[in-house]
Image (cartoon, coloured by chain):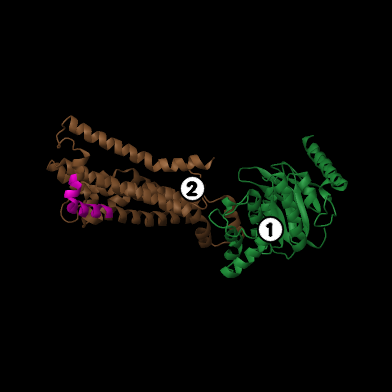
Amino acid sequence: MIVEPIREKRWLRFVAPLALGAVVLVAWEIAVRLYAVPVYILPGPLAIGAVLIAEWAGLEVALLVTLKITMMALVAAIVLGVLLAVLFAQSKFLERALFPYAVVLQVTPVVAIAPLVIIWAKDVTIALLICAWIVAFFPILSNTTIGLNAAERNLIDLFRLYRASRWQTLLRLLLPSALPYFFAGLRVSGGLALIGAVVAEFVAGTGGSASGLAYVILEAGYRLQIPKMFAALVLISTIGVVLFLLLGLLGHLALRRWHETEGAGEA
Amino acid sequence: MSPASLVRLTGVGKVFSTGTQALAGLDLAVAQGEFVSLLGPSGCGKSTALRLIAGLTAPSSGSIAWSDGAADRGPGEIGFVFQEPTLMPWSSALGNVMLPLRLAGVERAEAEARAAAQLGAVGLAGFERAVPRELSGGMRMRVSIARALVTRPRVLLMDEPFAALDEITRWRLNDDLITLWAQQRFTAIFVTHSVFESVYLSQRVVIIGARPGRAVAELSFMEPAPREAGYRTSVRYAEHCRAVSLRLAQALGAEAA
């Protein structure tokens, strides 16, 4: 009796948003046709789909560029965020001294920093990477820092009782304790890395072989190719959604056996 | 003071950084192989006394001396069971019990074998691979006890370990604990606020008065271990409980006056 509604909910979780999306798309297409909205104001979903297929070759290149920068920025955010958090856990002094500057980096809009970064970095890809990283790394740093400090007091005492070394305590207690926090931060960072990559490219506005989806939107905007702008937008959203789902799945797989927020009974 | 005492606390006081005086002038000697309960109301400092003996915190005054003259014990010589099971949720029952051995550098294969044997000794054979959230409260506490005993400690310190369990589980764990103690004869120091539990488990009950905590009275009982069937409902047990309750009431009454 209790199992049934949970199953139904799970099934609804996938079907409900998909059904709503389908309804909205159909309504959109009908509205565009009914009111004869010109394609340079608002194209219908079918027109956007047609461009997506027709111009796939160019869009695919841009998609891969944006995807590459997003993923590289995310990896850099994970490595540096976790490393810095571990360093903070080892030295309260370092944490006190450095954390405020991490906050400054976080609260400064990336649009404002991007022009400087683009001037300083020789390579555009590296400039974009730095911008995306600045946006993405803070949730990981902040969450992992909180997680490393969230280890149960009695377990810390237990490790002290058995004279565990710093290294043993970090590896066997602090890092596992921080995992749920890390994954929560990772899920946020994935989306932010994408936003950082796109925003930085808008600012850089460079064409050529290294141009991603943001540049496709800019260029299509100048040429009034509105369906193509939408097509690029669709691809950006798709990256974001897939990334969010994948990172969520990763966290679920890593934590499902032991963490309270995971498992069969989740909402 | 008998020469056989394993650990002796002399005039131990503890003041926290908040200014709270948790203990003052606590004298306590525990003999090798003895089962002692520290009985007192909540907040009387009995848990603090246990942490001092474990070396997790240092006394503000007085001294703690071990029979061999050392200031504290080596790793693995003391087992500690907290009020909560305090298990690592990401690790299996076996992994949790192995922890003290792995921290001491024991090889995985040997640690696994010893931990599995210890899990068997607390009645959890077959649950090696279960993670804490898959176990009941009583089973988690058994894992915690197995972890504390896996290094074959000379001293087992327990801080109200069964306070959160239901009575049926609690009674069963009481019996199992006495059986383990009778087999292995470690020195047990058991903190509790239950008169009935302290009498049932221990050879000696030390009553700790509150604000500040210190030993105010003690009573000894010589009962066979493990306890005979029906001891819990026997007249003898009831008399012991009555005696301890009276002394506790006197101690608390004298304080209130």
Q: Considering only vertical position in the picture, is B186 above or below A39?
A: below
Label 2 sits on a secondary structure element that is loop
Q: Where on the picture, by quarter, is residue A165?
A: bottom right
The numbered dot on residue A45 is: none
- Quarter of the N terminus of chain A within the rendering: top right
Q: Residues within 10 Å of mark 2 (few under 14, many from 20)?
A: some
Q: Position of residue A142 (x, y in %)?
A: 42, 48
The numbered dot on residue A262 is: 2
Q: Which residues are magenta?
A: A50-67
Q: Type of residue at label 2?
A: Glu
Chain letter, green in picture: B
Label 1 sits on a secondary structure element that is loop
Q: Where on the picture, by quarter, is residue A109?
A: top left
Residue at the spot x=18%, y=38% of the render?
A43
**Chain A as rendered: colour:** brown
Q: Considering only vertical position in the picture, is A244 above or below B111?
A: above
Q: Residues within 10 Å of mark 1 (few under 14, many from 20)?
A: some
Whether residue A138 is visible here, answered yes or no, is no
